[in-house]
Amino acid sequence: MSHESVQNYYGEVLQGSEDLQTNACCTPDDIPDHVKEVLSQIHDEVLTRYYGCGLIAPEALEGARILDLGCGAGRDVYALSKMVGPRGRVVGVDMTPAQLDVARRHQDFHAEAFGHDSSNVEFHHGFIETLEELDLEPGSFDIIVSNCVINLATDKAAVLRGAYHLLKDGGEMYFSDVYADRRVPDAMARDEVLYGECLSGALYWNDFLTLAKGAGFNDPRMVTARPLTIENPRLEARVAPLSFLSATYRLFKLPALESDCEDYGQAVIYKGTIPHAPHALRLDDHHVIEAGKVFPVCGNTWMMLKETRLEPHFDFIGDFSNHYGIFAGCGGNSPFTGLDPEGTAAACC
């Protein structure tokens, strides 16, 4: 699908979120109260032109430098600008001039609403597949976010490579998108409505994991996921038999991450000091770390906490001096599993 088709769909065909024909590009209701409070201060026109499928507000944002890929009319840029505060900065990139016009029109409104200089927000016109062509410094961002946009990209691998290049070491890409349970057929991928509705451009989830690792993001972590119910009989018939889900992933730029979760006998203790998370930190869908409790972790999780902006909020136990094999319950099946005492493999079908 061409850039021109997507620009037309989001700049001309859609005049507001009510024009969407499916529920793929909409946010679920379980938004934290502190985020709802920020969104309540966003200008109505910006909210009306919002097309997203998830929530892109990770923890510990104060003072962070953030890039929003496919920022549209700027809803997430402005919300994040409030969260990073006057010492932080949020940059939005989008390819649709009509959307950027809306975003820029309300820059002073949000600076006044949030009580800080509007210079902590800026918008760039460009393509997320060619980030290297924009005036953005490599290795300068703490966090890169995106909300239901990468599925619209013509070269998704290029987006991930560009994001990796722009992140600092220890930075992360934290984004929501739509994924398919299998590869989308070519005929469906050429359907402009299904593409604009964030469906037929969706990656097969396992292909996404391969692309992410190929870009340098070892050990992708899913944070949340929800099935998409299209609720449009005509379009449901056009996508059958595929199923889709909206998922939020976090990808850390940590070159030392291993392909599997290895056990070094390490543990962490969460201090409970991250705003709005006094009792527990949800790192991903299988790491909810309670405050004050010794929490055993694999080497990869250790690095995601120790070598990122999250480090001040944890105490760390152990190091990498001893290795105990695969971390229990984290995949990487050992060939020693299932051996009987004589060293022969247990019977199987």
Image: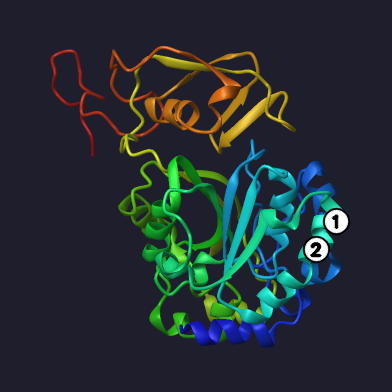
Count all numbered tags in the image, as a single digit. Answer: 2
Q: Is residue 128 left or right of residue 111?
A: left
Q: Position of residue 164 (x, y in %)?
A: 40, 52
Which image quadrant is residue 235 in?
Answer: bottom right
Which image quadrant is residue 51 in?
Answer: bottom right
Q: Is residue 79 above or below residue 13?
A: above
- Residue located at (31% from left, 53% from top): 214
Residue type pointed to by label 2 = Asp
Q: Of 171 and 8, which appears nearest the observer?
A: 171
Q: Residues within 10 Å of mark 2 (few under 14, many from 20)?
A: some
Q: Of 297 and 103, which appears nearest the observer?
A: 103
- Residue located at (84% from left, 48% from top): 37
Could you give the CA–CA distance between mark 1 and mark 2, rounded to whole angstroms?
6 Å
Disc sitting over residue 112 in the figure: 1
Q: Position of residue 99 (x, y in %)?
A: 67, 76
Q: Residues within 10 Å of mark 1 (few under 14, many from 20)?
A: few
Q: Is residue 83 left or right of residue 37?
A: left
Residue type pointed to by label 1 = Glu
* Quarter of the image that includes the C terminus: top left
Local secondary structure at mark 2:
helix
Q: Is residue 150 above or below residue 287?
A: below
Q: Of 51 and 90, which appears nearest the observer?
A: 90
Q: Position of residue 315 (x, y in %)?
A: 54, 15
Give the residue at mark 2: 108
Q: Is residue 16 left or right of residue 261?
A: right
- Residue located at (60% from left, 23% from top): 313
Q: Position of residue 308 (x, y in %)?
A: 49, 33
Callout 1 touching callout 2 (CB < 8 Å): yes
Residue 41 in view of the camera: no
